[in-house]
Amino acid sequence: RTRTLNPQLAGICLGYLGDSEDKAWDDEGLHYTADAADNGPLTAQFLFVVDAINFCFWPCPQLEYAELVGALKAQLEKDPAALDADRLAQLREEELASWYTAIGVELPELAERTRCLRQLGVVLRRDFGGLALNLVRAAGNSAVELVHLITGKLPAFRDESMYRGRQVFFYKRAQILVADLWGAYGKSRAAGDGPCAFPDIAELTTFADYRVPQVLRHVGVLKYDDELSRRVDAREEVRAGSDEEVELRAATIMAVEHLRQEIATQGPSLISAEVDWILWCYGEERRDAIGPHHRCLSIFY
């Protein structure tokens, strides 16, 4: 239902991102990073909370990533203890909702998002002294091991599907969390630079969500079959775990891998996470001018 075409987007990426190093992570300053330069714990705590609820924006037209992050950042800047593990473990739906109604957003999937944050708080308090940064340290400067730790300790991050009798592992939110930590703490691959320096960061794939395939389809890198095209264009929901949803996400990952390789022949050598960031920024800037993304009700993206 979805197939990849030649990665002609490489030229677009290079043209859009002649200064890719400057645009690679949070060039707009959306995130809390006040203590990242000193390898402090609050940035990691913040990013774990962000990516614990980083899913399913489309049911609320007022909610985009900037709003999701901005409300959490405002809470942390107002009260440095707002995202402590003890408080997350006891978080009520009404409290989480109030953080977003303050900016005019009715947070979708509120019960699921609250459950994910409670789970995070319980696990951090029980196993890691309340600090997300301690969980990161337990991975020993390995991005791959950190993905395994996150998905092993936090069931809400276990982004897995069955496809024709085979188990498929996407781990979108776990991988984007590791990449966010790497980006926020300086993008180092030297283990001596702190717990969020990952020599193996290139092992991560792209983060299979809905914005990246939307961009890839727009520029002709992905092509959907007629029925999937009709459903996406009609903004009909694509069922989580269905063959077409799994195929779409898998094709997105393969397309970005081909694209990354093509970019390397023409310009900078980027990892898949950086190509993802480029495509996401490209799509965010043009989201009202390009065709619709697929709609899937899921806690995984």
Image (cartoon, rainbow, N blue to C red):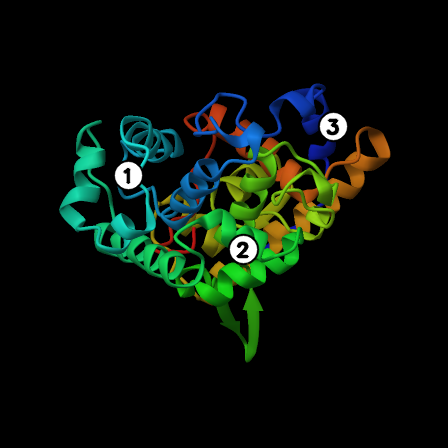
Q: Which residue lies at the image location 27% right of the left edge and 27% below the top edge?
A: 78
Q: Earlier in the sequence, mark 1 or mark 2?
A: 1
Q: Are marks 3 and 1 in contact (CB under 8 Å)?
A: no
Instruction: Say if residue 6 shows up in the picture.
Output: no
| Residue picked out by circle 1 | 82
Q: Are marks 2 and 3 in contact (CB under 8 Å)?
A: no
Check the picture and name the quadrant holding the N terminus: bottom right
Residue 49 located left or right of residue 172: left
- Image coordinates for residue 201, horizontal then vertical, percent: 69, 47
- Image coordinates for residue 219, horizontal then vertical, percent: 61, 34
Q: Which residue lies at the image location 23% right of the left edge and 42% below the top edge?
A: 107
| Residue picked out by circle 3 | 11
Q: Nearer the viewer, mark 1 or mark 2?
A: 1
Q: Earlier in the sequence, mark 2 or mark 3?
A: 3
- On screen, residue 20 above or below 196: above
Q: Earlier in the sequence, mark 3 or mark 1?
A: 3
Q: Amino acid at mark 1?
A: Ala
Q: Residue furthest left?
A: 94
In three-dimensional space, the C-alpha distance between marks 1 and 2, rounded to whole angstroms, equals: 37 Å
Point out which mark residue 248 bears.
Answer: 2
Q: Residues within 10 Å of mark 3 (few under 14, many from 20)?
A: some
Instruction: Say if residue 21 shows up in the picture.
Output: yes
- Image coordinates for residue 185, horizontal then vertical, percent: 59, 34
Residue 269: quarter of image: top right
* Element on which disc 1 rests: loop
Q: Amino acid at mark 2?
A: Leu
Q: Residue furthest bottom?
A: 165
